[in-house]
Every structure is written in structure tokens, then in C-alpha cells.
Amino acid sequence: MLPSVNRNGASTTALAFTTYALVPFLGILFVPGAVLVGIAGLIYSYRSPHKGGRRASLASVFLGLLILGVQLLLWWIIIKVPEWSNPGTGDF
């Protein structure tokens, strides 16, 4: 019933980076950490399978890339809002 113990410090850190990456606009600073440390945790989980953390590492890499896409969309929207508010000066 209980999940397996995660003794993989890199995967735990990657999950923390992923959690911080959820902050709108500011979270884009944490996305590279979530992906890179998640990859490091994944490599470490293959080298030391008894420590666990493979699922957490995979989740942080996948969610980090997903959050990166959402963060980039939010930044694109915030850049385009001034153009959208003045339709006479845009490239329509």
C-alpha cells in the first residue's frame, strides 16, 4: 500500500524544482533545474536501483518540459497584450 522509499536525493531535488516551477512567470527560472536534475536522478536511479527514485525523476523531466511550454506561452501572452490592446498600431 505504501509507496517505495525514495533515497535518491537528485530525484527529490528535481521534484522540488518542479514544484517551484509551477509559479506563474517566475517559475521559468526553475524549469531548467527540474529537467537537468531530473535527468541526473534518472541516471543515478539506473546506476543504483536500490535507492529508487526512477518514477520521480521521470515525472520531473516530463512535467518540467510541460511546464516549460506553459511558461513560454504565458510569457508570449504577456509580451503580446500591449499589441492586442492597441489594434491600430499592430500588424493586422
Image (spheres, rainbow, N blue to C red):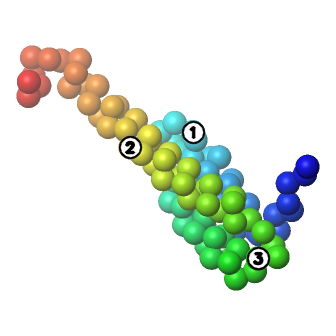
Q: Is residue 48 left or right of residue 1?
A: left
Q: Mark 3 or mark 1: which comes first in sequence? A: 1
Residue lying at the far right of the rendered structure: 1
Pick the residue in front: 34 or 62.
Answer: 62
Q: Which residue is mark 2?
A: 72
The residues bearing labels 3 and 2 have C-alpha atoms spaced at a distance of: 35 Å
Residue at 54%, 66% (x, y): give it: 36
Query: What's under tag 2, amino acid-wise?
Result: Leu
Whether residue 80 appears in this view of the structure is: yes
Residue 84: % across, % down: 22, 21
Q: Is residue 35 left or right of residue 57?
A: left
Q: Secondary structure at mark 2?
A: helix
Residue 49: % across, % down: 76, 76
Tell me if residue 42 comes above or below residue 19 in the rendering: below
Q: Which residue is mark 1?
A: 23
Query: What's under tag 3, amino acid-wise?
Result: Pro
Q: Secondary structure at mark 3?
A: helix
